[in-house]
Amino acid sequence: MNEQGGMQKEAMTRGERRKQKRLFVFVCLLFVVSTCVVGAWVVAKQKTSEQKAIEQFIVALRQEDMHMLQQFIDVPLENKASLLPLFAYLRKHQEGYDQIRKELDRQKDDRVYIKGLTSTPPIFLMKLSQGTYKFEPALYHVYVQTNEQGARILINNTYVGETNASLMKVGEYVPGLYEVKMVTDEREQTKKISLFGGERIRIVHFDSN
């Protein structure tokens, strides 16, 4: 009798262990599925937020909406003049909007640009800052090369200095259309440059007398 009771108890114990095992497997599967679903939802939400930010940014550029752009662009913008070269470029080259959008779309899946180490930065670098998407414009380093000494250099009619070496750095500029002018007592030379994609370092060559 005792032996039969022991066998029944052992059978019940095995059954309980199987139930516990099945419950454990079910809980594990439920956890995995829940994690995958939540992860997929987070990724989808992030991509939707990124795409929405990109579209709003492009619209603000098209409308030249400084109020909106000041919220989006991750550099100090004192006034509308800060972006006039960019607006001038985009008015002349409408395809520039698509170029910006395509670069930003690529960044959603492939953020390989390392600031300061890549010679060809994106026109705008998309970043997430304190829960808000920001767009940091590329800064192009502009140099003037000439044998003229003491020539006055103007960028978009703004005086930036005088030449004192054969290669002179005149400043860093956001994307846009610029006019570089070299003025001496004898003559004046003007060249237009487009800073919109490509190499960060740009050299403007002027002939000497």
Image: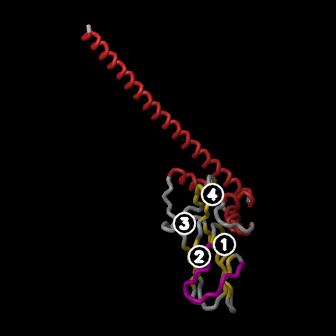
Of pointers 3 and 1, the one earlier in the residue sequence: 1
Q: Amino acid at mark 4?
A: Lys
Q: Residues within 10 Å of mark 1 (few under 14, many from 20)?
A: many
Instruction: Give the farthest residue toward the left.
Output: 3
**What residue appears at the point 59 percent right and 66 percent down from the top-left corner?**
138
Q: Secondary structure at mark 3?
A: loop
- Residue 201 included in the magenta stretch of the image: no
Disc 1 or disc 2, which is closer to the eye? 2
Disc 4 to disc 1, how far (Cα)?
25 Å
| Mark 2, residue position | 142
Q: Are marks 1 and 2 in contact (CB under 8 Å)?
A: yes
Residue 73, given in percent of the width and then of the height, sits at 66, 61
Kindly indicate the quadrant of the structure image that contains residue 24. Answer: top left
How dense is the environment of label 2, judged by Cα within 10 Å: few (below 14), some, or many (20 and up)?
some
Q: Which mark, by number, is residue 198? A: 3
Say which quarter of the image contains residue 185: bottom right
Q: Which residue is mark 1?
A: 178
Which numbered circle lies on residue 43? none
**Helix, strand or loop for the magenta stretch, by majority:** strand
Against 115, is 18 above or below?
A: above
| Residue under the image location 61 percent in, 91 percent down | 149
Say which residue label 4 marks: 134
Where in the figure is residue 81, as x and y percent of width and height? 73, 69
- Magenta residues, as a range? 157-172
Q: Are marks 2 and 4 in contact (CB under 8 Å)?
A: no
Give the mark, 3 or 2, whose residue is nearer the N terminus: 2
